[in-house]
Image (tube, rainbow, N blue to C red):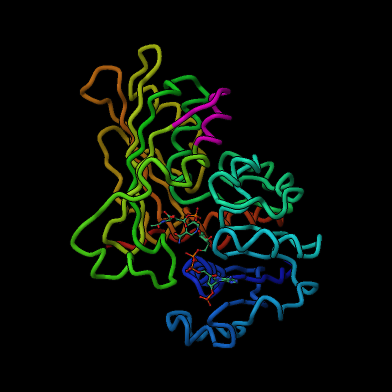
Amino acid sequence: MKDVSVAILGASGYTGAELVRLLALHPSFKIKVMTGDRKAGQSMDSVFPHLGGLQLPDLVAIDHVDFTSVDAVFCCLPHGTTQEVIAALPASVKVVDLSADFRLFDVDTYAQWYGHEHRAPELQKQAVYGLTELARDAVAKARLVANPGCYPTSVQLPLIPLLQAGLIEAADIVIDAKSGVSGAGRAAKEANLYTEVTEGMHAYGVASHRHSPEIEQGLSQAAGAPVLVSFTPHLIPMSRGMQSTIYMKARNGAKAADLRARLAAVYKNEPFVRVLPEGVVPHTRHVRGSNHCLMSVFDDRVPGRIIITSVIDNLVKGASGQALQNMNLMFGLPETLALAQQPMFP
Ligand SMILES: NC(=O)C1=CN([C@@H]2O[C@H](COP(=O)(O)OP(=O)(O)OC[C@H]3O[C@@H](n4cnc5c(N)ncnc54)[C@H](OP(=O)(O)O)[C@@H]3O)[C@@H](O)[C@H]2O)C=CC1
Ligand SMILES: CC(=O)N[C@@H](CCC(=O)OP(=O)(O)O)C(=O)O
Protein backbone atom coordinates (compact mmCIF):
# COMPACT_ATOMS: atom_id res chain seq x y z
CA MET A 1 0.00 0.00 0.00
CA LYS A 2 1.48 3.36 -1.06
CA ASP A 3 2.14 5.89 1.70
CA VAL A 4 -0.14 8.93 1.82
CA SER A 5 1.40 12.16 3.20
CA VAL A 6 -0.98 13.74 5.66
CA ALA A 7 -1.23 17.22 7.14
CA ILE A 8 -3.28 17.90 10.28
CA LEU A 9 -4.25 21.56 10.54
CA GLY A 10 -5.05 22.39 14.14
CA ALA A 11 -3.10 19.45 15.56
CA SER A 12 -2.72 21.28 18.89
CA GLY A 13 -6.47 20.99 19.51
CA TYR A 14 -8.52 18.06 20.82
CA THR A 15 -9.73 16.70 17.48
CA GLY A 16 -6.25 17.09 15.97
CA ALA A 17 -4.72 15.16 18.86
CA GLU A 18 -7.38 12.48 18.55
CA LEU A 19 -6.48 12.08 14.86
CA VAL A 20 -2.82 11.66 15.79
CA ARG A 21 -3.80 8.97 18.31
CA LEU A 22 -5.78 7.09 15.65
CA LEU A 23 -3.26 7.58 12.83
CA ALA A 24 -0.47 6.12 14.97
CA LEU A 25 -1.82 2.69 13.93
CA HIS A 26 -2.56 3.53 10.28
CA PRO A 27 -0.60 1.46 7.76
CA SER A 28 -0.40 4.08 4.99
CA PHE A 29 -1.37 7.56 6.25
CA LYS A 30 1.87 9.16 7.45
CA ILE A 31 1.76 12.45 9.34
CA LYS A 32 4.17 14.87 7.65
CA VAL A 33 2.80 18.23 8.78
CA MET A 34 1.01 19.44 11.89
CA THR A 35 -0.02 23.01 12.50
CA GLY A 36 -0.82 25.08 15.56
CA ASP A 37 -1.67 28.71 16.04
CA ARG A 38 -0.62 29.89 19.52
CA LYS A 39 1.36 26.65 19.89
CA ALA A 40 3.22 26.88 16.57
CA GLY A 41 6.92 26.20 17.16
CA GLN A 42 6.29 23.70 19.97
CA SER A 43 6.82 19.95 19.86
CA MET A 44 3.73 17.73 19.94
CA ASP A 45 5.19 15.88 22.96
CA SER A 46 5.20 19.11 24.94
CA VAL A 47 1.63 20.04 23.93
CA PHE A 48 0.20 16.52 24.36
CA PRO A 49 2.50 14.33 26.48
CA HIS A 50 0.22 11.31 25.91
CA LEU A 51 1.40 11.36 22.27
CA GLY A 52 5.09 11.28 23.14
CA GLY A 53 7.43 8.87 21.37
CA LEU A 54 5.67 8.90 18.01
CA GLN A 55 8.45 10.81 16.17
CA LEU A 56 6.00 13.50 15.11
CA PRO A 57 6.96 16.70 13.32
CA ASP A 58 6.87 19.90 15.39
CA LEU A 59 3.86 22.19 15.16
CA VAL A 60 4.23 24.97 12.58
CA ALA A 61 2.06 27.91 11.53
CA ILE A 62 -0.15 27.25 8.49
CA ASP A 63 1.63 30.00 6.51
CA HIS A 64 4.85 27.98 6.73
CA VAL A 65 3.47 24.82 5.14
CA ASP A 66 4.32 23.76 1.58
CA PHE A 67 1.16 21.85 0.63
CA THR A 68 2.58 20.62 -2.69
CA SER A 69 4.19 17.68 -0.86
CA VAL A 70 0.96 16.68 0.90
CA ASP A 71 -1.74 14.26 -0.36
CA ALA A 72 -4.37 14.64 2.35
CA VAL A 73 -5.40 17.36 4.79
CA PHE A 74 -7.47 16.96 7.94
CA CYS A 75 -8.64 20.43 8.81
CA CYS A 76 -9.32 20.70 12.56
CA LEU A 77 -9.64 24.48 12.82
CA PRO A 78 -12.42 26.49 14.48
CA HIS A 79 -15.43 27.16 12.29
CA GLY A 80 -15.15 30.44 10.45
CA THR A 81 -11.38 30.07 9.96
CA THR A 82 -11.39 27.26 7.44
CA GLN A 83 -12.94 28.34 4.14
CA GLU A 84 -10.05 30.50 2.92
CA VAL A 85 -7.44 28.00 4.13
CA ILE A 86 -9.03 25.15 2.17
CA ALA A 87 -9.67 27.33 -0.89
CA ALA A 88 -5.92 28.02 -1.07
CA LEU A 89 -4.89 24.33 -1.10
CA PRO A 90 -3.64 22.68 -4.31
CA ALA A 91 -6.47 20.93 -6.20
CA SER A 92 -4.62 17.61 -5.91
CA VAL A 93 -4.99 17.54 -2.13
CA LYS A 94 -7.96 15.64 -0.64
CA VAL A 95 -9.53 17.35 2.34
CA VAL A 96 -11.75 16.36 5.25
CA ASP A 97 -12.88 19.45 7.12
CA LEU A 98 -13.99 18.79 10.70
CA SER A 99 -15.40 22.28 11.18
CA ALA A 100 -18.87 23.44 10.24
CA ASP A 101 -17.58 25.62 7.38
CA PHE A 102 -18.73 23.42 4.48
CA ARG A 103 -21.62 21.50 6.05
CA LEU A 104 -24.56 23.65 5.00
CA PHE A 105 -25.29 23.40 1.26
CA ASP A 106 -27.16 26.69 1.19
CA VAL A 107 -24.77 29.61 1.64
CA ASP A 108 -27.59 31.94 2.75
CA THR A 109 -28.50 29.55 5.56
CA TYR A 110 -24.80 29.44 6.43
CA ALA A 111 -24.59 33.24 6.59
CA GLN A 112 -27.73 33.41 8.73
CA TRP A 113 -26.40 30.95 11.34
CA TYR A 114 -22.68 31.70 11.28
CA GLY A 115 -22.90 35.48 11.10
CA HIS A 116 -20.83 36.11 7.97
CA GLU A 117 -20.97 35.49 4.23
CA HIS A 118 -19.50 32.20 3.02
CA ARG A 119 -15.92 32.86 1.91
CA ALA A 120 -15.64 30.01 -0.61
CA PRO A 121 -19.10 29.57 -2.17
CA GLU A 122 -17.77 27.83 -5.31
CA LEU A 123 -15.94 25.27 -3.21
CA GLN A 124 -19.06 24.75 -1.11
CA LYS A 125 -20.77 23.30 -4.22
CA GLN A 126 -18.17 20.51 -4.35
CA ALA A 127 -18.36 19.58 -0.69
CA VAL A 128 -19.88 16.21 0.24
CA TYR A 129 -21.55 15.91 3.65
CA GLY A 130 -19.71 12.97 5.16
CA LEU A 131 -22.15 11.06 7.32
CA THR A 132 -20.27 8.00 6.17
CA GLU A 133 -22.76 5.17 6.49
CA LEU A 134 -25.39 7.12 4.54
CA ALA A 135 -23.11 8.82 2.00
CA ARG A 136 -20.43 6.24 1.30
CA ASP A 137 -20.43 6.37 -2.51
CA ALA A 138 -20.31 10.18 -2.66
CA VAL A 139 -17.58 10.31 -0.01
CA ALA A 140 -15.43 7.84 -1.94
CA LYS A 141 -15.50 10.15 -4.99
CA ALA A 142 -15.13 13.43 -3.12
CA ARG A 143 -12.21 15.82 -3.04
CA LEU A 144 -13.66 17.81 -0.11
CA VAL A 145 -15.71 16.21 2.65
CA ALA A 146 -17.52 18.26 5.26
CA ASN A 147 -17.37 16.07 8.34
CA PRO A 148 -20.67 16.20 10.26
CA GLY A 149 -20.99 17.85 13.66
CA CYS A 150 -21.11 15.63 16.70
CA TYR A 151 -24.75 16.26 17.67
CA PRO A 152 -25.91 15.93 14.03
CA THR A 153 -24.11 12.56 13.74
CA SER A 154 -25.82 11.15 16.83
CA VAL A 155 -29.23 12.36 15.64
CA GLN A 156 -29.16 11.73 11.89
CA LEU A 157 -27.89 8.13 12.05
CA PRO A 158 -31.13 6.96 13.71
CA LEU A 159 -33.59 9.41 12.16
CA ILE A 160 -32.68 9.47 8.46
CA PRO A 161 -33.54 5.81 7.74
CA LEU A 162 -36.83 6.17 9.66
CA LEU A 163 -37.88 9.27 7.72
CA GLN A 164 -36.87 7.68 4.43
CA ALA A 165 -39.10 4.71 5.22
CA GLY A 166 -42.02 6.93 6.31
CA LEU A 167 -42.11 5.28 9.74
CA ILE A 168 -42.18 8.53 11.75
CA GLU A 169 -43.82 11.93 11.46
CA ALA A 170 -41.44 14.59 10.16
CA ALA A 171 -43.11 17.13 12.44
CA ASP A 172 -42.83 16.97 16.20
CA ILE A 173 -39.26 15.66 16.56
CA VAL A 174 -37.72 16.66 19.90
CA ILE A 175 -34.00 16.16 20.55
CA ASP A 176 -32.60 16.39 24.06
CA ALA A 177 -28.82 16.01 23.76
CA LYS A 178 -25.88 16.01 26.16
CA SER A 179 -22.19 16.47 25.48
CA GLY A 180 -18.95 16.09 27.40
CA VAL A 181 -16.82 19.20 27.74
CA SER A 182 -14.19 18.24 25.14
CA GLY A 183 -16.89 19.10 22.58
CA ALA A 184 -16.08 22.73 23.25
CA GLY A 185 -12.42 22.37 22.24
CA ARG A 186 -9.21 22.94 24.17
CA ALA A 187 -8.95 26.72 23.96
CA ALA A 188 -9.49 28.21 27.44
CA LYS A 189 -12.97 29.61 28.05
CA GLU A 190 -14.37 30.72 31.39
CA ALA A 191 -17.60 28.79 30.83
CA ASN A 192 -15.66 25.55 30.54
CA LEU A 193 -13.57 25.83 33.69
CA TYR A 194 -13.76 22.84 36.04
CA THR A 195 -15.54 24.97 38.62
CA GLU A 196 -18.19 26.05 36.13
CA VAL A 197 -18.91 22.58 34.79
CA THR A 198 -18.42 20.02 37.56
CA GLU A 199 -21.25 18.83 39.83
CA GLY A 200 -23.95 20.28 37.65
CA MET A 201 -25.30 20.53 34.15
CA HIS A 202 -27.01 23.11 32.00
CA ALA A 203 -28.68 23.60 28.67
CA TYR A 204 -27.13 26.02 26.20
CA GLY A 205 -28.00 27.35 22.77
CA VAL A 206 -31.68 26.79 23.62
CA ALA A 207 -33.75 27.13 20.44
CA SER A 208 -30.74 28.73 18.77
CA HIS A 209 -27.94 26.17 18.41
CA ARG A 210 -26.17 26.19 15.03
CA HIS A 211 -26.48 22.42 14.73
CA SER A 212 -30.26 22.81 14.25
CA PRO A 213 -30.00 23.79 10.56
CA GLU A 214 -27.44 21.03 9.98
CA ILE A 215 -29.76 18.40 11.46
CA GLU A 216 -32.72 19.86 9.57
CA GLN A 217 -30.82 19.79 6.27
CA GLY A 218 -30.29 16.01 6.54
CA LEU A 219 -33.76 15.23 7.87
CA SER A 220 -35.45 17.39 5.22
CA GLN A 221 -33.61 15.53 2.46
CA ALA A 222 -34.68 12.23 4.00
CA ALA A 223 -38.32 13.30 4.38
CA GLY A 224 -38.50 15.00 1.00
CA ALA A 225 -40.01 18.10 2.64
CA PRO A 226 -38.79 20.77 5.06
CA VAL A 227 -38.35 19.50 8.61
CA LEU A 228 -37.94 21.61 11.74
CA VAL A 229 -36.77 20.10 15.02
CA SER A 230 -36.74 21.16 18.65
CA PHE A 231 -33.12 20.68 19.69
CA THR A 232 -31.61 21.46 23.08
CA PRO A 233 -27.97 20.59 23.83
CA HIS A 234 -26.64 20.34 27.39
CA LEU A 235 -23.14 20.41 28.81
CA ILE A 236 -22.49 17.68 31.36
CA PRO A 237 -19.48 17.03 33.59
CA MET A 238 -17.57 14.38 31.68
CA SER A 239 -14.62 14.81 29.36
CA ARG A 240 -15.94 12.92 26.32
CA GLY A 241 -19.14 11.30 25.17
CA MET A 242 -22.51 12.35 23.83
CA GLN A 243 -26.07 11.12 24.19
CA SER A 244 -29.09 12.22 22.18
CA THR A 245 -32.52 11.24 23.47
CA ILE A 246 -35.01 11.75 20.67
CA TYR A 247 -38.81 11.84 20.98
CA MET A 248 -41.05 11.37 17.95
CA LYS A 249 -44.47 10.23 16.73
CA ALA A 250 -44.81 6.98 14.83
CA ARG A 251 -46.77 6.93 11.56
CA ASN A 252 -49.52 4.52 10.60
CA GLY A 253 -49.46 2.64 13.89
CA ALA A 254 -45.78 1.69 13.69
CA LYS A 255 -44.25 0.41 16.93
CA ALA A 256 -40.73 0.46 18.33
CA ALA A 257 -40.24 -3.07 16.98
CA ASP A 258 -40.93 -1.86 13.42
CA LEU A 259 -38.49 1.03 13.76
CA ARG A 260 -35.87 -1.20 15.33
CA ALA A 261 -36.23 -3.69 12.50
CA ARG A 262 -35.76 -0.93 9.91
CA LEU A 263 -32.63 0.41 11.62
CA ALA A 264 -31.24 -3.09 12.14
CA ALA A 265 -31.71 -3.83 8.42
CA VAL A 266 -30.04 -0.57 7.32
CA TYR A 267 -27.07 -1.01 9.64
CA LYS A 268 -26.74 -4.80 9.69
CA ASN A 269 -23.39 -4.86 7.87
CA GLU A 270 -22.01 -1.68 9.40
CA PRO A 271 -18.93 -2.12 11.56
CA PHE A 272 -19.53 1.05 13.58
CA VAL A 273 -23.30 1.33 14.06
CA ARG A 274 -25.19 -1.07 16.32
CA VAL A 275 -28.90 -1.20 16.95
CA LEU A 276 -29.40 -2.67 20.41
CA PRO A 277 -31.97 -5.34 21.28
CA GLU A 278 -35.28 -4.40 22.90
CA GLY A 279 -34.88 -2.89 26.35
CA VAL A 280 -31.10 -2.43 26.21
CA VAL A 281 -29.97 1.12 27.04
CA PRO A 282 -26.74 2.40 25.45
CA HIS A 283 -24.28 4.17 27.76
CA THR A 284 -21.70 6.73 26.65
CA ARG A 285 -19.19 4.48 28.45
CA HIS A 286 -19.92 1.77 25.86
CA VAL A 287 -18.48 3.85 23.00
CA ARG A 288 -15.71 5.76 24.75
CA GLY A 289 -12.60 6.02 22.56
CA SER A 290 -14.26 4.10 19.71
CA ASN A 291 -15.86 5.02 16.39
CA HIS A 292 -19.11 3.33 17.37
CA CYS A 293 -22.64 4.67 17.49
CA LEU A 294 -25.10 2.65 19.59
CA MET A 295 -28.82 3.25 19.41
CA SER A 296 -31.91 1.83 21.05
CA VAL A 297 -35.62 2.23 20.27
CA PHE A 298 -38.44 2.23 22.85
CA ASP A 299 -42.22 2.54 22.77
CA ASP A 300 -43.22 5.49 24.94
CA ARG A 301 -46.05 5.09 27.48
CA VAL A 302 -47.87 7.76 25.52
CA PRO A 303 -49.60 5.84 22.72
CA GLY A 304 -48.07 6.36 19.30
CA ARG A 305 -44.88 7.95 20.58
CA ILE A 306 -41.36 6.55 20.28
CA ILE A 307 -38.13 7.32 22.16
CA ILE A 308 -34.67 6.67 20.72
CA THR A 309 -31.40 7.02 22.58
CA SER A 310 -28.18 7.27 20.60
CA VAL A 311 -24.63 7.52 21.94
CA ILE A 312 -21.27 8.34 20.36
CA ASP A 313 -17.87 9.56 21.49
CA ASN A 314 -17.92 13.18 20.33
CA LEU A 315 -14.20 13.10 19.55
CA VAL A 316 -14.30 9.86 17.55
CA LYS A 317 -17.53 9.10 15.61
CA GLY A 318 -18.48 12.73 16.30
CA ALA A 319 -15.25 14.11 14.82
CA SER A 320 -11.82 12.51 14.20
CA GLY A 321 -12.91 8.88 13.82
CA GLN A 322 -15.57 9.69 11.23
CA ALA A 323 -13.05 12.00 9.52
CA LEU A 324 -10.59 9.11 9.23
CA GLN A 325 -13.37 6.76 8.08
CA ASN A 326 -14.11 9.26 5.31
CA MET A 327 -10.48 9.81 4.34
CA ASN A 328 -9.93 6.03 4.13
CA LEU A 329 -12.78 5.85 1.62
CA MET A 330 -11.45 8.83 -0.35
CA PHE A 331 -8.19 6.91 -0.88
CA GLY A 332 -9.94 3.66 -1.80
CA LEU A 333 -8.91 1.99 1.47
CA PRO A 334 -11.04 -0.13 3.83
CA GLU A 335 -12.91 2.42 5.91
CA THR A 336 -12.12 0.61 9.16
CA LEU A 337 -8.34 1.10 8.85
CA ALA A 338 -6.95 2.33 12.19
CA LEU A 339 -10.49 2.47 13.58
CA ALA A 340 -11.13 -1.11 14.62
CA GLN A 341 -10.31 -0.67 18.30
CA GLN A 342 -13.04 -1.51 20.78
CA PRO A 343 -14.21 1.09 23.32
CA MET A 344 -12.28 1.61 26.55
CA PHE A 345 -14.22 0.41 29.59
CA PRO A 346 -14.76 1.43 32.32
N1 LIG B 1 -14.33 18.87 19.97
C1 LIG B 1 -15.30 18.16 19.39
O1 LIG B 1 -15.89 17.25 19.99
C2 LIG B 1 -15.69 18.44 17.98
C3 LIG B 1 -15.12 19.46 17.25
N2 LIG B 1 -15.49 19.70 15.95
C4 LIG B 1 -14.92 20.78 15.19
O2 LIG B 1 -13.57 20.49 14.88
C5 LIG B 1 -12.81 21.70 14.85
C6 LIG B 1 -11.67 21.59 15.87
O3 LIG B 1 -12.23 21.39 17.16
P1 LIG B 1 -11.33 21.16 18.45
O4 LIG B 1 -10.18 20.32 18.11
O5 LIG B 1 -12.27 20.71 19.50
O6 LIG B 1 -10.84 22.66 18.76
P2 LIG B 1 -9.61 23.16 19.65
O7 LIG B 1 -9.99 24.50 20.12
O8 LIG B 1 -9.25 22.12 20.65
O9 LIG B 1 -8.43 23.29 18.58
C7 LIG B 1 -8.42 24.26 17.57
C8 LIG B 1 -7.14 24.17 16.78
O10 LIG B 1 -7.11 25.20 15.79
C9 LIG B 1 -5.98 26.06 15.99
N3 LIG B 1 -6.43 27.43 15.69
C10 LIG B 1 -7.26 28.20 16.42
N4 LIG B 1 -7.50 29.37 15.80
C11 LIG B 1 -6.77 29.35 14.66
C12 LIG B 1 -6.58 30.27 13.60
N5 LIG B 1 -7.19 31.46 13.59
N6 LIG B 1 -5.75 29.93 12.58
C13 LIG B 1 -5.12 28.74 12.57
N7 LIG B 1 -5.26 27.81 13.56
C14 LIG B 1 -6.09 28.12 14.57
C15 LIG B 1 -5.58 25.87 17.43
O11 LIG B 1 -4.20 26.18 17.58
P3 LIG B 1 -3.56 26.61 19.01
O12 LIG B 1 -4.17 25.73 20.04
O13 LIG B 1 -2.10 26.34 18.78
O14 LIG B 1 -3.87 28.04 19.19
C16 LIG B 1 -5.88 24.37 17.60
O15 LIG B 1 -4.85 23.60 17.03
C17 LIG B 1 -13.77 22.84 15.20
O16 LIG B 1 -14.26 23.42 14.03
C18 LIG B 1 -14.86 22.11 15.95
O17 LIG B 1 -16.05 22.81 15.90
C19 LIG B 1 -16.40 18.89 15.34
C20 LIG B 1 -17.00 17.87 16.01
C21 LIG B 1 -16.73 17.59 17.40
C1 LIG C 1 -19.89 21.08 24.21
C2 LIG C 1 -19.81 22.01 23.02
O1 LIG C 1 -19.57 23.19 23.15
N1 LIG C 1 -20.01 21.46 21.84
C3 LIG C 1 -19.96 22.19 20.62
C4 LIG C 1 -20.32 21.30 19.48
C5 LIG C 1 -19.24 20.43 19.08
C6 LIG C 1 -18.61 20.92 17.84
O2 LIG C 1 -17.49 21.28 17.89
O3 LIG C 1 -19.36 20.95 16.76
P1 LIG C 1 -18.98 21.75 15.41
O4 LIG C 1 -18.02 20.94 14.68
O5 LIG C 1 -20.21 21.98 14.67
O6 LIG C 1 -18.35 23.05 15.78
C7 LIG C 1 -20.99 23.30 20.55
O7 LIG C 1 -22.07 23.16 21.10
O8 LIG C 1 -20.73 24.27 19.82
Image quarter in which the N terminus is found: bottom right
In this rendering, the answer to whether 308 lies above or below 75 is above
Residue 242, position as x, y percentages in the image: 36, 52
Residue at 58 percent across and 23 percent down: it is 224
Q: Main secondary structure of the magenta part?
A: helix
In the picture, measured across the screen, residue 286 lies left or right of residue 267, that is left
Residue drawn at (29%, 32%) of the image: 278
Q: Residue furthest left?
A: 199
Q: How many marks?
A: 0
Q: Which residues are magenta?
A: 216-228
**Would you say residue 222 sits in the magenta stretch?**
yes
Give 232 or 242, whichever is nearer the viewer: 232
Q: Nearer the viewer, residue 255 or 121?
A: 121
Residue drawn at the location 37% of the way across and 17% of the way down: 254
| Magenta-drawn stretch contains 161 | no
Query: Is residue 333 shown above or below 231?
Result: below
In the picture, residue 235 is in which quadrant?
bottom left
- Pinpoint residue 320: horizontal percent, then vertical percent: 52, 60
In the image, residue 222 sits, relative to residue 339, either above or below, namely above
The x and y percentages for residue 289 are 40, 62
Instruction: Determine whether, in the image, residue 57 is placed left or right of residue 200.
Output: right
Q: Residue 119 appears at what percent x and percent y? A: 69, 55
Residue placed at 30% from the left, 22% from the top? 305
Q: Quadrant of residue 239?
A: bottom left
295 horizontally vs 110: left or right: left
Q: Is residue 53 left or right of residue 204?
A: right
Q: Nearer the viewer, residue 275 or 41?
A: 41
Instruction: Tell me the quarter of the image containing the C terminus.
Output: bottom left
